[in-house]
């Protein structure tokens, strides 16, 4: 082999290191590594491609998600998804330093870069926190809250005589 042919091989491998693809079917999240079907270059379908995710975070990528594929040593048969973006559900208008965890339905946990945390459920379904939840600092609730099965806004106090007096603060 000549130096020129070695250079051509290296150049082709470098060209094939990274590709942009799209998730074609819902990924399989049952194994030790999530795998998915990725279509690259608009036509080449690659099944069982590993989807690498950062520690402490896992997501099943929606069909249509754009994916950056790293082909190890430039070998297209040895690819792995290293980054992804689902452009349709990505929150827009974040301010400098903010971080948002989101899903395809629009539910969000927004870290507001010093102004607190905002949790938003677009579905109208209740937000469920399991286990002991501690909130240090004020809590603002924009709708009713149910505490121990009792509505905060609609609950009634018994044994109160009508008049101009108000009830006292709860006792600890």
Image (spheres, rainbow, N blue to C red):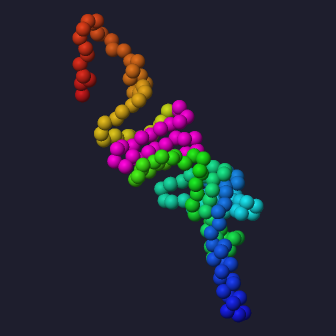
Please give the name of the residue rendered at 73% of the width and 60% of the height, measured from the top-left corner. Answer: 42
Question: Residue 135 appears at what percent x and percent y?
Answer: 34, 40
Inspect the magenta stretch and tell me whether residue 103 lies in it: yes
Question: Residue 128 appears at what percent x and percent y?
Answer: 47, 37
Q: Is residue 72 visible?
A: yes
| Residue projecting furthest to the right | 43
Please give the name of the residue rendered at 42% of the width and 25% of the height, measured from the top-left corner. Answer: 144
Question: Residue 139 appears at what percent x and percent y?
Answer: 34, 35
Please name whichever residue, 103 or 50, is drawn nearer the observer in this view of the structure: 103
Instruction: For the C terminus, give its image quadrant.
Output: top left
Q: Is 23 rendered above or below residue 160?
A: below
Inspect the magenta stretch and tell me whether residue 131 lies in it: no
Please give the name of the residue rendered at 69% of the width and 59% of the height, measured from the top-left corner. Answer: 38
Q: Is 73 rendered above or below residue 154?
A: below
Does residue 2 appear left or right of residue 149 in this picture?
A: right
| Residue projecting furthest to the top | 162
Does residue 57 appear left or right of residue 133 in this picture?
A: right
The stretch in magenta equals 102-125
Predominant SS along the magenta part = loop
Please name whichever residue, 135 or 140, is drawn nearer the observer in this view of the structure: 140
How many numbered marks does the figure carry?
0
Please give the name of the residue rendered at 36% of the width and 43% of the height, measured from the top-left corner. Answer: 116
């Amino acid at each position: 082999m000549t130096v020129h042919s070695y250079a051509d091989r290296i150049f082709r491998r470098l060209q094939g290191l990274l590709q942009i693809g799209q998730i074609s079917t819902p990924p399989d999240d049952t194994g030790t590594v999530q795998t998915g079907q990725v279509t690259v270059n608009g036509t080449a379908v690659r099944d069982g491609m590993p989807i690498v995710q950062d520690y402490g975070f896992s997501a099943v990528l929606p069909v249509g998600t754009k994916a950056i594929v790293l082909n190890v040593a430039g070998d297209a048969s040895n690819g792995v998804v290293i980054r992804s973006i689902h452009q349709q559900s990505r929150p827009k208008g974040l301010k400098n330093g903010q971080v948002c965890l989101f899903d395809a339905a629009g539910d969000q946990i927004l870290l507001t870069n010093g102004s607190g945390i905002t949790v938003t459920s677009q579905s109208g379904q209740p937000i469920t926190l399991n286990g002991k939840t501690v909130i240090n600092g004020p809590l603002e609730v924009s709708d009713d809250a149910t505490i121990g099965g009792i509505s905060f806004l609609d609950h009634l106090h018994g044994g109160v005589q009508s008049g101009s007096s108000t009830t006292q603060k709860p006792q600890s």
